[in-house]
Amino acid sequence: MEIRPLEKKNHSTTPDNPGASQTVEVLQRRWLSDNAFEIELTRPPALEFAPGQAIRVIHDSIERYYSLISTPQDSTLRICVYHIPRGSLSPVLAAAEIGASIRITGPHGYFTFSTSGRTPVFAATGTGIAPFVSMGRSGMSDFILLHEVELAEDFYYQDLFLNIASSYTPCLSAPATADSSLPGIFHGSAADFIKNRLAPGVYDFYLCGKREMTSRITLLADELFPGSNVFREVFY
């Protein structure tokens, strides 16, 4: 499938008008694994965002939200896409030619970090890691990060987080396989790690990804870490 070029729009996308659409172009695509890729887009001059926010990608009648992995200072926009071969939009983005036109709106969402004095715990499944990439690339550090995937090849961005997180734990939720012998891997879900390994304390939990993960950790925060805050962004 290909993305058909769209007519240029005169709408301005600003924080005061995030629903207005603009046309951007595909600059490049980089595969992170067999299941996910980054796609880089031109950035409208008026589009301002905070780390953790998303853009909405529109193709025909299909609309999907993708958290930005760019920093607010970057001259381009980048998103991380999980490739679903029979999906509605990810195959289009996976096949889009360089220079193809895409319509977007934004910024959207309120999944942004606020300093509170409590230790932040970031937990993500799959491409739910995206908002934390933007936060980390924007200068944030000294957080606990749990990244849950089923295949070890999907621990993308671990080089970034190994350098800036106070604690980075890749969580392999599927049964142990030949590719899961990398050092530091926790065999279990992010919720399992929090239940059995996270030290008692009061935290700010930032959760992004599958509903099952966000729901389980929310319950654990209430039961085991009283006084903690929970912020959630459910991807799928």
Image (cartoon, rainbow, N blue to C red):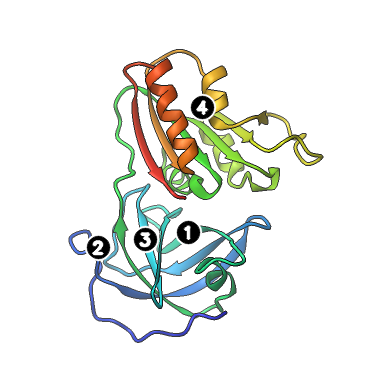
Judging by the rendered image, the residue that carries numbered circle 1 is 79
Residue 46 or residue 21, whichever sits in front? 21
Residue 54, position as x, y percentages in the image: 37, 55
Q: Amino acid at mark 1?
A: Ile
Q: In the picture provided, is 173 more to the left or to the right than 13?
A: right
Residue 117, position as x, y percentages in the image: 32, 22
Q: Amino acid at mark 2?
A: Pro
Check whether the beta carbons of the residues at disc 2 and disc 4 lie within 8 A of each other. Answer: no
What kind of element bears circle 4?
loop
Q: Residues within 10 Å of mark 3 (few under 14, many from 20)?
A: many
Q: Residue at x 30, y 58 (%)?
A: 107
Q: In the picture provided, is 5 more to the left or to the right than 53?
A: right
- As measured in the structure, the alpha-carbon distance from the residue carrying label 2 to the one carrying label 4 is 34 Å
- Mark 1 or mark 4, which has the lower sequence index? 1
Q: Residue at x 52, y 23 (%)?
A: 194
Q: Nearer the viewer, mark 2 or mark 4?
A: 2
State the mark number for residue 18.
Answer: 2
What kind of element bears circle 1?
strand
Q: With respect to residue 92, does 108 lie above or below?
A: above
State the mark number for residue 55.
Answer: 3
Check whether the beta carbons of the residues at disc 1 and disc 3 lie within 8 A of each other. Answer: yes
Q: Amino acid at mark 4?
A: Ser
- As measured in the structure, the alpha-carbon distance from the residue carrying label 1 to the one carrying label 2 is 17 Å
- Mark 1 or mark 2, which has the lower sequence index? 2
Judging by the rendered image, the residue that carries numbered circle 4 is 166
Q: Is residue 197 visible?
A: no
- Mark 3 or mark 4, which has the lower sequence index? 3
Q: In which quadrant of the rendered view does residue 173 lie?
A: top right
Q: In which quadrant of the rendered view does residue 31 lie?
A: bottom right
State the mark number for residue 224.
Answer: none
Check whether the beta carbons of the residues at disc 3 and disc 2 lie within 8 A of each other. Answer: no
